Image: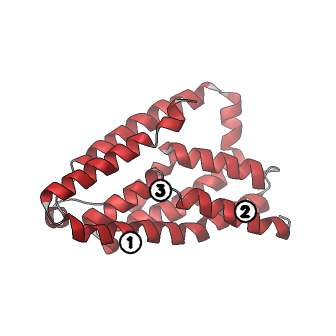
Amino acid sequence: MIPDILPALMIFALVTVATPGPNNLMLMASGANFGFRRSIPHMLGIGLGFPAMIVLVGLGVMQLFDLWPQSYLVLKIVSVAYMIYLAWKIAHASAPKDAEATGKPLSFVQAAAFQWVNPKAWSMGLSAITLYAAGRDLGSVLWVAGAYVACAVLSTTGWTLMGQQVRRLLRIPARLRAFNWAMAGLLIASLVPVLIR
């Protein structure tokens, strides 16, 4: 990779991971419902799972989509169905005290696996590889993945802390219900760009 495009890659990675999307909305909801410490596996699953996806996409998964174009439709259907399920779970999350006793945030593996059905992650990954690792050589793909690891630290921490701060306002059950329904609605709304393509 040419060193002078590294700043552009870092800006691209930071903007794409920091803007609202399914991962960030779920982290905010997790921070609000479970607190920062219990959300760390979820944060790590995103922070390492997405770059792992970048590597696999850059080194060959894109070719599978080129060979079997119907796979885009299958991916879209599975992604939308899973996102609706997650929105339902967020909308019906317990109050923070109850959540600490019975609820569980996403685990590392669940959050990492979620990247494969996250429409925004696919869009980001395919764009990043196309723009910054067009030759799909291992070195360039690893630079792109590394940029996302670095930027994910900032983004996942920020969104989870934001959720944790909101938690103080959510001690009243009606507020928590409204917040969870709003987060679920935003998660569903984040699907609109995928559905209108």
Dot 1 falls on a residue whose secondary structure is helix
Say if residue 20 shows up in the picture: yes
Specify few, some or many for label 1: CA neighbours under 10 Å numbering under 14, 14-19, or 20 or more. Answer: many
Q: Is residue 80 above or below residue 158?
A: above
Dot 3 falls on a residue whose secondary structure is helix
Give the label on residue 116, or none: none
Residue 69: image quadrant is top right
Q: Position of residue 181 (x, y in %)?
A: 26, 47
Q: Position of residue 39 (x, y in %)?
A: 35, 67
Specify few, some or many for label 2: CA neighbours under 10 Å numbering under 14, 14-19, or 20 or more. Answer: some
Which of the marked residues, 3 or 1, is nearer the chain's N terminus? Answer: 3
State how the image is colored.
secondary structure
In the image as oriented, which residue stretches furthest toward the bottom? 37
Give the label on residue 112, or none: 3
Which callout, 3 or 2, points to the residue nearer the camera? 2
Q: Is residue 191 above or below residue 12?
A: above
Three-letter amino acid code at the position of disc 1: Leu
Position of the N terminus by quadrant: bottom right
Give the label on residue 161, or none: 1
Q: CA distance from mark 3 to mark 1?
A: 20 Å
Q: Is residue 16 left or right of residue 63?
A: left
Three-letter amino acid code at the position of disc 2: Leu
Which residue corresponds to the image point at 60% horizontal and 25% vertical from the top-left? 70
Q: Position of residue 31 (x, y in %)?
A: 33, 66
Q: CA distance from mark 3 to mark 2?
A: 22 Å
Dot 2 falls on a residue whose secondary structure is helix
Three-letter amino acid code at the position of disc 3: Ala
Position of the C terminus by quadrant: top right
Label 3–label 1 contact, CB within 8 A: no
In the image as oriented, which residue stretches furthest toward the top? 70
Give the label on residue 9, or none: 2
Which of the marked residues, 1 or 2, is nearer the chain's N terminus? Answer: 2
